[in-house]
């Protein structure tokens, strides 16, 4: 028993699971006690589904914990008066306009905007489907990173036209013009991640760019060296799940997760590099899918879903014959949507028909998709996402999944 409903416990209040309404949007973060440890299970804003309900039932949870500062939200949730939630664009046309606007911006990591540093690019905030300028700057009129930028809410982005200036700024940080002392290893990892995103964006804009693919291979080797030097580097290399979904960020995350798993199973540096390359390039075929389908509001119809599925073969067409892409990398591209049960696509492969790199890429791809924010879906917590994937043991290699869960044990 966790405690009586409403009782304060370590700055949390308890709430009966029976009070959670299937189909409702949770206005508070949800924690549970497992093995004596408090773990974040559901994020604020997530829709409480029957799957979420079944996870609680399987874990034998009768009461959940909510941060005490969100107690008022619990009262509002329990009220019979309907909740008023911030709504996304209310029409397909409005959502298409938002998606187009979003494509003009590039995500940046707030952790690399060092207070007092000079930046020659403007900073914008993405929040509640709206973009707003936080700090105006240019090469001729730079600005200084201060409280206005660092204290702003929302996700920070810059214009695509300023990405080259951001890249130069990253180079300055990697040359030691950033935070001193103990922060250096973390900054090095963040710079590697951001540079990887820049290269992936360049590749998705020009998928047949041999130069971009060559740079991708070089970044993979640096990533492996960083993780081998310090296994905890993987946590800095992963983009925060609160970030909106961008294909280039997703591609980097999947590669980081795949490389981390490759290192965890002692795959060997050469093989891990080929795995990382395939994982980084696994979604390059999406560059051939019309943006109106990729960014569609709501559920895809059968024809649109079939079209989305072709990104696997389209990726192979783009990459096949490129000397910078090793043959061993292709299973990660071709099989990242295959499932051990045979329910995947495009070839409906089963168990032993799926190669090791395909199995690893499938786990990494699914995990990042579940923990990444979407316009109509709040991100799952890592703990909840891993619980969902573990339920699908018939779809994913159980031994790899055990190692994957252990690898991500420190992620909250």
Image: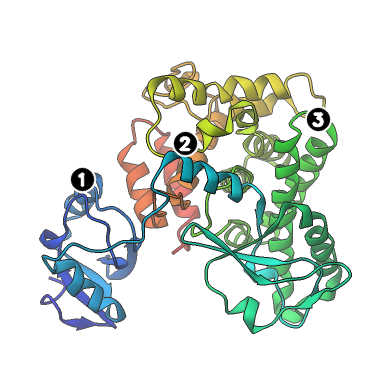
**Element carrying mark 1:** helix
Q: Which residue is mark 1?
A: 50
Task: Look at the picture and state if 8 lies above or below 52.
Answer: below
**Element carrying mark 2:** loop
Structural distance between the alpha carbons of marks 3 and 2 = 33 Å
Q: Which residue is mark 2?
A: 296
Which numbered disc, 3 or 1, marks the residue closer to the eye? 1
Structural distance between the alpha carbons of marks 3 and 1 = 45 Å
Instruction: Give how far across and how far down residue 284 sits, in percent.
Output: 65, 32
Looking at the image, tell me whether mark 1 or mark 2 is earlier in sequence order: 1
Looking at the image, tell me whether mark 3 or mark 1 is earlier in sequence order: 1
Quadrant in which the N terminus is drawn: bottom left
Q: Nearer the viewer, residue 60 or 316?
A: 316
Q: Are marks 1 and 2 in contact (CB under 8 Å)?
A: no
Q: Rate crowding at label 3 as few (under 14), some (14 to 19) or many (20 or more) other CA atoms within 10 Å.
A: some
The residue drawn where x is 53% and y is 72% is 153
Note whether residue 342 is visible.
no
Task: Look at the picture and state if 279 lies above or below 310.
Answer: below
The residue drawn where x is 42% and y is 47% is 370
| Coloring applied to the structure | rainbow
Q: Rate crowding at label 2 as few (under 14), some (14 to 19) or many (20 or more) other CA atoms within 10 Å.
A: some
Instruction: Give how far across and how far down residue 276 sits, in percent.
Output: 66, 40
Q: Which mark is residue 324?
A: 3
Q: Rate crowding at label 1 as few (under 14), some (14 to 19) or many (20 or more) other CA atoms within 10 Å.
A: few
The residue drawn where x is 57% and y is 75% is 152
The residue drawn where x is 40% and y is 30% is 300
Horizontal arrangement in the rendering, residue 47 relative to residue 91 (left or right): left
Looking at the image, tell me whether mark 3 or mark 2 is earlier in sequence order: 2
Instruction: Give how far across and how far down residue 221 sits, in percent.
Output: 76, 46
Note whether residue 141 is visible.
yes
Give the quadrant of residue 67: bottom left
Instruction: Give how far across and how far down residue 191 sits, in percent.
Output: 73, 61
């Amino acid at each position: 028993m966790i405690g009586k409903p409403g009782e304060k416990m370590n700055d949390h209040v308890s709430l009966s699971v029976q009070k959670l309404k299937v189909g409702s949007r949770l206005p508070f973060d949800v924690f549970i006690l497992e093995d004596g440890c408090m773990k974040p299970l559901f994020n604020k804003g997530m829709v409480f589904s029957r799957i979420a309900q079944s996870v609680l039932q399987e874990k034998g949870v009768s009461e959940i914990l909510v941060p005490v500062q969100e107690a008022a939200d619990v009262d509002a949730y329990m009220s019979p008066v309907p909740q008023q939630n911030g709504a996304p664009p209310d029409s397909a046309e409005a959502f298409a306009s938002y998606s187009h606007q979003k494509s003009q911006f590039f995500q940046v990591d707030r952790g690399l905007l060092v207070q007092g540093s000079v930046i020659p690019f403007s900073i914008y905030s993405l929040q509640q489907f709206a973009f707003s300028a936080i700090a105006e700057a240019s090469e001729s009129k730079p600005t200084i990173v201060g409280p206005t930028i660092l204290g702003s809410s929302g996700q920070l982005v810059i214009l695509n036209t300023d990405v080259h200036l951001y890249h130069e700024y990253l180079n300055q940080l990697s040359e030691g013009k950033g935070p001193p002392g103990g922060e250096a290893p973390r900054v090095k990892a963040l710079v590697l991640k951001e540079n990887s995103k820049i290269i992936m964006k360049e590749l998705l804009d020009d998928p047949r760019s041999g130069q971009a693919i060559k740079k991708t291979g070089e970044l993979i080797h640096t990533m492996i060296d960083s993780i081998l030097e310090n296994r905890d580097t993987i946590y800095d290399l992963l983009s925060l799940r609160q970030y909106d979904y961008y294909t280039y960020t997703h591609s980097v995350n999947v590669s980081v997760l795949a490389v981390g798993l490759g290192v965890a199973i002692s795959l060997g540096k050469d093989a891990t590099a080929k795995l990382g390359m395939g994982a980084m390039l696994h979604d390059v075929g999406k560059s051939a899918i019309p943006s109106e389908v990729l960014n569609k509001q709501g559920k895809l119809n059968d024809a649109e879903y079939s079209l989305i599925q072709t990104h696997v073969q389209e990726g192979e067409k783009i990459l096949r014959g490129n000397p910078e892409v090793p043959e061993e990398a292709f299973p990660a591209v071709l099989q990242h949507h295959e499932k051990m049960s045979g329910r995947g696509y495009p070839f409906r492969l089963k168990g032993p028909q799926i190669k090791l790199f395909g199995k690893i890429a499938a786990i990494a791809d699914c995990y990042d998709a579940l923990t990444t924010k979407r316009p109509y879906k709040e991100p799952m917590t890592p703990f909840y996402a891993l619980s969902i994937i573990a339920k699908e043991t018939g779809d994913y290699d159980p031994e790899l999944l055990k190692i994957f869960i252990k690898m991500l044990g420190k992620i909250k």
